[in-house]
Amino acid sequence: MAPKILIMGPQGAGKGTQSQRIVEAYGVKHITTGGALRANKQRDISDLDLEYDTPGAYMEAGELVPDVVVDAIVEAALDEVDGFVLDGYPRNIDQAEALDEMTDIDVVLVLEVSRETSVKRLTGRRVDPETGENYHTEFDMPDDEAVRERLVQREDDTQEAVETRLDVFEEETAPAIDHYSDHEGYTTIDGEQSPDAVWADIDAAVERKVEGS
Ligand code: AMP
């Protein structure tokens, strides 16, 4: 059985990094609403008569893109896959309820990190625009000088946008995580550990579920 996995937690908890490992180990598809929205930043959504006319305007402000846009992206993506790791969705209670209508989830992984850790990881994050690979100014810079020189900071990784995104997480996404607290596949993981130690905990949780089914 290809598992259906949610990976939740604040920005900078390591969801993207660990999702890649889940994809490699379990052969599931990575569905990331942040990634999908970044690819559709300039899409004209003015016909929906919302606060802003593009997803990118919400993202730069550190605000959530409206549910009507994001739910449709997830529903279309889920239609095309069997097993998946869903990263960055649901981000509020309404999205969690929308997801309940779309599919059944096997494992809910919740990566826990302090606000201080999130801020440090995000404000130091740099992205290689050519490969999409993430680096960190303090913990993980590329050896190749050409790569080092072309690294950029995401517009929403500035101190101000990061603080807003973490406020949104605490107000809106933490309750969406609570929505799953009685789910049989609900597992909390200490995201302050090294990436390898986090992965060991995730692998054990997913393995338990895959074997038990
Ligand atoms: P991320 O890369 O997951 O941090 O997402 C970057 C930005 O995309 C967020 O700050 C939001 O503006 C938007 N976004 C991503 N996922 C969602 C979602 N599930 N609901 C609303 N907005 C989202």
Image (tube, rainbow, N blue to C red):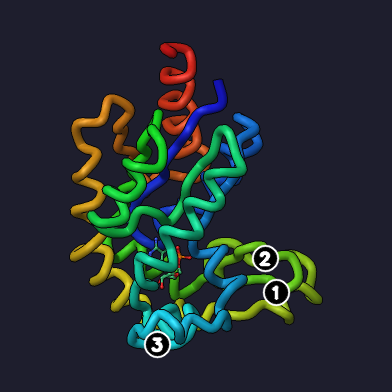
Identified by mark 2, the residue type is Gly
Q: Marks 1 and 2, Cα distance to the nearest angstrom?
A: 5 Å
Which quarter of the image is occupied by the N terminus? Answer: top right
Question: Percent x, y for residue 145?
Answer: 78, 74
Task: Tell me the residue that label 3 is attached to.
Answer: 52
Q: Which dot marks residue 129?
A: 1
Q: Say if disc 2 is inside 8 Å of ligand 1.
A: no
Residue 99 is left or right of residue 147, and the answer is left
Q: Which residue is disc 2 drawn over?
A: 132
Q: Quadrant of ligand 1?
A: bottom left
Q: Residues within 10 Å of mark 2 (few under 14, many from 20)?
A: few
Q: Position of residue 175 (x, y in %)?
A: 19, 53
Q: Residues within 10 Å of mark 3 (few under 14, many from 20)?
A: some
Residue at 54 percent of width and 39 percent of height: 84
| Three-letter code for the amino acid on which mark 3 is drawn | Tyr
For image coordinates 27% across by 48% down, the residue present is 97
Q: Are marks 1 and 2 in contact (CB under 8 Å)?
A: yes
Rounded to the nearest angstrom, the CA distance separating label 2 from label 3 is: 26 Å
Looking at the image, can residue 159 be seen?
no
* Disc 1 to disc 3, C-alpha distance: 26 Å
Seen as rendered, the residue at the extreme top is 212
Q: Is residue 201 above or below residue 64?
A: above
Q: Secondary structure at mark 1?
A: loop
Front-lying residue, 107 or 207: 107
